[in-house]
Image: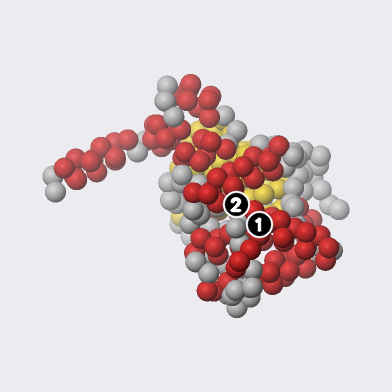
Amino acid sequence: MPVSSSAGELGIRCERIWKSFGEVVALDGIDLRMPNGLVHSLLGPNGSGKSTLMKVAIGLLKPDSGRALVNGIDPRIDPISVRKIVGYMPEEVVAYDSLNPAEYLSFIASLYEMPRESLEVRSRALSKLLALEEYMSKPIGELSHGNRRKVLLAGSLIHDPSVLILDEPFSGLDPESAKILKEALLDYASRGKTVIISTHVLEIAEAVSKQVVIMQRGRIVAEGPVDSLRSMTGAKDLEEVFIQVTGVSGEIQDLLRALKEL
């Protein structure tokens, strides 16, 4: 298996990654390490580059320059090995609407050449964990947005990957399911796996993350443990940290003044 000189380093490593779409710079020289055994949260305004970074990191997009390593493997050199160890959930709901969740999970498992026995055990456990048991035989296209998101989440977990990358996994989830997912992510990281999520819900990021990366306009404007970021900025919580480092406090005040004048 072709690997880089960094083989043996677990987790995600990004080295001077640049990515643009036409004249829009999505990633502007990103240097970042996200080691295993932790939950990492990518935060930032819409268009800050979070989803692009996730896709580049696992080889779904090619960087214009720089490289990403997944457990020491360069996805440009050995994409198959990377995909075998990664579970990925996109932000957009992309699934086969005519399949039911059981068929979808069976299809995903076949891509990873999972034994039938393992599929059945994992499928039962995930459907129970995510409260999907009563929907397993219904077409995905007929499910609610929240349940369709759960099906995608189950698909990213079915093969018990060592690297889990979830783009807005809490979107559309009810409070009970969100609580279960938070506990599941913490358990996943405690077993030495790499967990990376993006979210706009800062309370969730603060509750589950050991490391936070805040992005803006394709750059990292702050990173580190939540406690360190609070101490560095003098903020009382992650929301205040976010407002300070992204410089949106002035915009918020302008909006509040505009609302008062309506």
Q: Which of the two discs, 1 and 2, sits closer to the camera?
A: 1
Q: Is residue 158 above or below residue 53?
A: below
Label 1–label 2 contact, CB within 8 A: no
Q: Is residue 60 above or below residue 241?
A: below
Q: What residue is shown at x 81% (from left), y 60% (from top)?
A: 118
Q: What residue is shown at x 72% (from left), y 61% (from top)?
A: 123
Q: What residue is shown at x 40% (from left), y 31% (from top)?
A: 240
Q: Which mark is residue 166?
A: 2
Tag 2: amino acid: Leu
Neighbours of disc 1 within 10 Å: few (<14), some (14-19), many (20+) = few
Mark 1 or mark 2, which has the lower sequence index?
1
Q: Which residue is mark 1?
A: 128
Mark 1 to mark 2 CA distance (whole Å): 20 Å
Q: Which mark is residue 77?
A: none
Tag 1: amino acid: Lys
| Residue 121 figure quarter | bottom right
* Residue 94 image offset from top left, x and y in percent: 57, 67
Can residue 59 be seen by looking at this rendering?
Answer: no
Question: In this view, which residue lies farthest toward the bottom?
Answer: 98
Q: How many marks?
A: 2
Indicate the secondary structure of the residue bearing disc 2: strand
Q: Nearer the viewer, residue 213 or 21?
A: 213
* Residue 140 image offset from top left, x and y in percent: 58, 72
Neighbours of disc 2 within 10 Å: few (<14), some (14-19), many (20+) = many
